[in-house]
Structures are given as C-alpha cells and as structure tokens.
Amino acid sequence: MTKPVPDKAEIALEYPDKFYVGTFEHSSRFEAHLDGNGVALVLERPGTEDVRKSVHLHINFGLLAGILRELAGSVAAIPKDDIAHRELLASALRELQEALKTS
C-alpha cells in the first residue's frame, strides 16, 4: 500500500561517469516498512514514461540505528523556533518507540 508523499524528497545518485537526480513531491507516493533485516523504502512518481520514476532503498537495522544517532547529533540544525518540524519528528519517533515496545 502506498501513501502520498507528505512533503518532499530529493534523491541523487553519483557514479564516476553518470549523475542522476530526482525529486518526489506531493503528487508522488511512498511505501515504507520493516522486514526481517531492516527498512524497505520505495518512492514513486507516477505518470507518463518521460516523468515516471521510482527509487527502492533497503537499509539494514544497524545502519538505520547509526543514521538515527547521527540525526540526533545534528538536531541543532533545526532552529529552536521551528516548532512545527521539531514536533513532527518527535511525534513520529514517539509512535515508532511505542510500536517497538508493544509489538
């Protein structure tokens, strides 16, 4: 089941001889779920062949934990008066923490 992208994502892939960049906004959809090894994330932009694109990403739990720790260390980058974004992140993390406790 996919859901509308509530904000925006920018993806860049850089190879020695190629560079790909894509944006996924409100008209795009996403799916995210945990499996036995980590997190699976799919971003899809529907449409005609010339605009349609998708990104599939799998991150193992160890790397995800490392990413979350790095994010915690850089929270100061969100201005203290940006209450909306801070609360959005805090609320989502509370939901994840509760789900981890009860499942």
Image: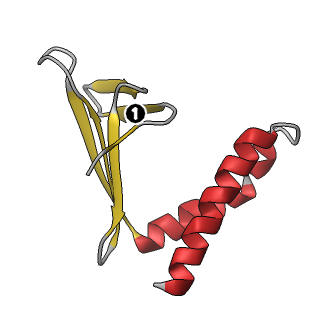
| 66 lies left or right of 51 | right
- Is 3 drawn above or below residue 19 in the view shown? below
Residue situated in front as seen by the camera: 79 or 94 = 94
Residue 11: image quadrant is: top left
Q: Residue at x 59, y 76 (%)?
A: 98
- Regarding residue 71, the answer to whether it shows in the image is no
In this view, the residue farthest toward the right is: 81
Residue situated in front as seen by the camera: 60 or 25 = 25
In this view, the residue farthest toward the bottom is: 102
Q: Residue at x 30, y 26 (%)?
A: 20
Residue situated in front as seen by the camera: 66 or 26 = 26
- Give the colour scheme of this rendering: secondary structure
- Quarter holding the C terminus is bottom left
Residue under numbered circle 1:
11
Residue 22, given in percent of the width and then of the height, sits at 35, 25
Residue 63, given in percent of the width and then of the height, sits at 46, 66
Residue 13: image quadrant is: top left
